[in-house]
Amino acid sequence: MDLALKQRFLDIWTNSFPGAELPITLYYTDEEGRAPSVEPKETQHCLIGELLNIRNGRPACFDKHNVLCRGGRRYLGFSQTIRSNFEYFLSCGIPGELEGERYKKSPEIVADSMQNMPPFESPGRYLIAKRWDLLKESDEPMLVVFFARADVLAGLFTLANFDEREPDGVIAPFGSGCSAILYHPYRELQSDRPRAVLGMFDVSARPFVQPDVLSFAVPWKKFLAMVANADESFLITESWAEVRSRIGGRGEAGLSH
């Protein structure tokens, strides 16, 4: 991690998004000890719930043993399997046997949609999650993930599209909360034209974030471009100054759940 870049972003964030929550970073490694290992909790399966501690400044290490949610393991690349009858679980269920989440109209639609979400194998044994201000020179972020309200999202969205010729520099694919912050952004990371991913629309994950907060996950290459473009973008205009003043008045620090 380039520490000059770390400070450069902190300066941009403080000046243009005053008081807004800092992003977290995600990356894979085979090296132990980069962050404390998360203790698996039988009462807390959702990865998004664990992220609150990270957002509050406590780095964490995830692996195939401490991610209890089967979907979470798959979307983090720690498993390539999927639960049995998943197409029924995500749709109508099986009477007397399995309650369906009803996020899709039919099992057939689920089965077809999953063809567009092939599993992947994690490129490292561990997934490290750290808030931006806690990054060290030894850290190697792959993704930068913001949890933000509408005004901040508007700024991130506009900056992500600043150097784009196409209208979809930001995408919002269907998926779980963990797929929105890792699976889909990681796939974008492999692209010649990586796009940011707007997410946290997963109804099951919503209880683990504030009511008015969504996620905005940025592949590293895209993030570097956003930082490089900041000083010549709308962030220096009076239009943004008006929005910025509202961000500064929201008092976003001090997360709780």
Image: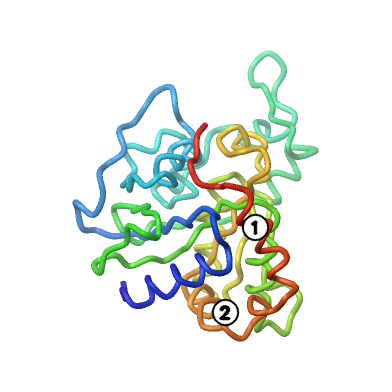
SS for tag 1? strand
Q: How many marks?
A: 2
Q: Residue 4: horizontal and vertical position, in percent?
A: 34, 77
Distance from label 1 to label 2 (Cα)?
A: 20 Å
Q: Which residue is at 63% across, 48% downward?
A: 250
- Looking at numbered disc 2 in the image, what kind of residue is underneath it? Ala
Which quadrant does the N terminus fall into? Answer: bottom left
Rendered position, 39 above or below 13: above
Spot occupied by residue 202 in the image (x, y as percentages of width and height) = 65, 41
- The residue at the point 68 percent across, 70 percent down is 241
Q: Nearer the viewer, residue 87 or 60?
A: 60
Question: Where residue 255 appears, x then y in whole percent?
Answer: 50, 40
Can you tell which mark lies on residue 99?
A: none
Q: Which residue is mark 1?
A: 198
Mark 2 lies on residue: 230
Q: Residue at x 55, y 33 (%)?
A: 84
**101 and 37: which is toward the camera:** 37
- The percent position of residue 46, horizontal first and vertical second, equals 49, 35
Amino acid carrying mark 1 in the image: Leu
